[in-house]
Amino acid sequence: MRIFVAIACLALTAVATAAQPELRLVEKDKSPVAIEVAGLPAELTAQLATLKVDDDAWRRILSVRVGKSPAPDQPAMSGNYELRDSALRFTPQFPLRAGLAYRAEVFLPAPSREAAPSHYDRVFELPAPARGEPARVTTVYPSAATLPENQLRFYLHFATPMARGEAYEHLVLLKADGRPVLRPFLEIGQELWDTSGTRLTLLIDPGRIKRGLSPREEHGPVLEAGGKYTLVITKGWCDAAGQTLTDDYRKTFTAGPPVETAIDHKAWKIAPPASGSKDPLVVTFPQPLDRALLEHTITVVGPDGKPIAGEVTVGKDERTWKFSADQAWIAGQHELVIDTTLEDLAGNRINRPFEVDEFKEIDKSSLPEYVRLPFPIRPAR
């Protein structure tokens, strides 16, 4: 009877089921990404098509839980629901993990008040992948030993794709005396992983960085100049294959003065290579810049105005940028074309500092998307 009441709350008209629906896995690139139920009555799919994306009615029809026999009070997984070719598809917020089992349940409204709703379920057991390289942290950026007080983000790199949904359980920021900093990170439900699952972007709570915002007023800044801190990635975190980090990883650094001015690209030092050579073009920055953004926000353009193909290497402490062209350099006027979304460690951009007056109107349309730095490559003598 409780099930009937729950289904009645859907505000969906009761429909008759002609056949048992089919529960199935949806795969992409040979990996399971979603769970579908097909063969639903046409009347029901028509009514589902009218629901908003955040309507609880979706999960009352189809719910997915972790485990072969989940506890009765275990909440259903969060994710997105949609209709695909008359099938109801559930894509979980975090990817289905190899080596785990998932129970999918379908409840269909009763065809009449006297009848009970229909219930179907199926357990999907995902095989564990073959074990490869051990799970470990390979590096953390920024790499410098001194970071600005208003440091905005870290990039955590792992040797293998990591399991999602548990990152913040394994991340701690310690003060010099070993005490943890209170809620230092911006905890995002959809964790900021790259497509490979091996790099996590970890943001310090911007509300603790910008002056005048209530989190900073209430708890103070996360980092204070002169203080010593240790970012700890704790052991026990599982990768996608079920392997755990066997040791803690620590990055210790000192907080320096805040960096509050926009990036001055005109202060960059460009060391051009010799024409006819394949030596790298080297650009040196006055201060460290964002590692990930440096990899794709600077383009080298040749005398013909076309981009030059080559490979980017970011140097020590993210203060140098090297570009090795695929072909030998030719003499003539070249340019660095810089996307103004490039940021430094504190989130400052070209033409715009991170710490701006929120109450002052900013004409973003007047800011260029790209800036250019010309440099010559001289003919060989």
Image (spheres, grey):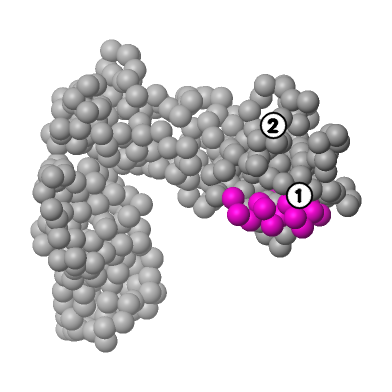
Can residue 281 be seen here?
A: yes
- For the magenta stretch, what is the residue range? 31-51
Q: Which numbered tag is attached to residue 326? A: none
- Which of the pair 271/357 is nearer the observer? 357
Q: The disc labelled 2 sits on which kind of residue? A: Ala
Residue 46 within the segment the image draws in magenta: yes
* Residue labelled with disc 1: 37
Report x, y in % for residue 21. Answer: 83, 49
Task: Give the class, few, some or many, for how many residues have Cα within 10 Å of label 2's Cα (few <14, many ≥20).
Answer: some
Report x, y in % for residue 355. Answer: 15, 43
At 86% from the left and 36% from the top, the residue drawn is: 115
- Which of the pair 123/90 is nearer the observer? 90
Q: Secondary structure at mark 2?
A: helix
Number of numbered labels in the structure image: 2
The label nearer to you, 1 versus 2, is 2
Residue 127 within the segment the image draws in magenta: no
- Which of the pair 307/189 is nearer the observer? 189
- Quarter of the image containing the N terminus? top right
- Residue 256, compared with residue 40, is above or below; it is above
At 36% from the left and 52% from the top, the residue drawn is: 292
At 71% from the left and 30% from the top, the residue drawn is: 5
Q: With 170 as the anchor, is 310 left or right in this view?
A: left
- Which of the pair 374/80 is nearer the observer? 80
Q: The disc labelled 1 sits on which kind of residue? A: Val
* Residue labelled with disc 2: 6
